Amino acid sequence: MNIIWLNMTDSTNAHAVRNRYEVEELTIWSAHYQSEGKGQRGNKWESSRSMNLTFSILVRPVDLQANAQFVVSQIASLAVVEYLAAKGVTAKIKWPNDIYVGDRKICGMLIENFLSGDKLSESIIGIGININQLQFSPEIPNPTSLIRETNCNESYDLHRELEIFSEIFEKLYLNSRASGRTLDELNLTYNRLLYRKGEYFRFLQTEYYNEGTPVEIVGKIVGIEEKTARLIIELEDGQCRKYFFKEIAYII
């Protein structure tokens, strides 16, 4: 993979979008600092300068239908989990693609897809992995980092860590494409690694309100729906409900 290091940029995703026609597939742009790092739900992604990995990957899936674009998110999520496992850290995937160690977030993603007709032409996969940062803003909920989880006495070399991750990602991505792995196969591994799967927890239905407050439910995650990538939650009475992104929120 071609890795391009930037001293500073607004956001690696924005930089990747601007430059995506000038590079080959599997190019990575990584920045020591982002002035306008972006996260999910329009949130800002905060990272101390030269402390963490903040990067974006360009992929051009071959013959992937637009309605199957969640495959890209699954591959990226599994690559981060595998990378952390190689460092001795057990992680889970908080649907759709946040990565958690226990109840603490170590990685977030923002994926931007581009379509050509009914197929996916390109994806920009923005990933932020907390590596060496120990102190976080109190406004950031439940963060953690690799150095925290491993109790390492020395800072990790960001360049080396990105090389390790890129090798894992490239292998997963190319094997997936070359072998024609089905959505069922990807879902099997992804579902197995879902955060809070199989136990009852509290959630907020953010599309349903009672006197201005999101309606709370108690249920357990049983998996994701293959065709839509909706999260499936089984309520205490056995009823199953399915949620798109932003329709349900975890209570942590």
Image: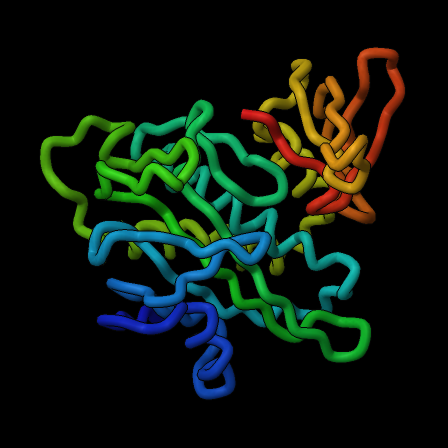
Question: Is 196 rendered above or below residue 2?
Answer: above
Task: Residue 206: tell me if it is visible.
Answer: yes
Residue furthest to the front? 211
**Residue 120: quarter of image:** bottom right
Question: Is 128 rendered above or below residue 190?
Answer: below
| Front-most of residues 190 and 231 | 231
Question: Quarter of the image containing the N terminus?
Answer: bottom left
Question: Is 55 rendered above or below residue 109?
Answer: below
Left or right: where does residue 249 sit relative to residue 173? right
Left or right: where does residue 8 sit relative to residue 221? left
Left or right: where does residue 1 sit relative to residue 79? left
Please provide percent x and percent y for residue 94. Answer: 57, 35
**Residue 248: quarter of image:** top right
Please provide percent x and percent y for residue 139. Answer: 39, 41
Left or right: where does residue 243 sit relative to residue 5? right
**Residue 178: quarter of image:** bottom right
Residue furthest to the bottom? 22
Residue furthest to the top? 237
Task: Residue 1: tell me if it is visible.
Answer: no
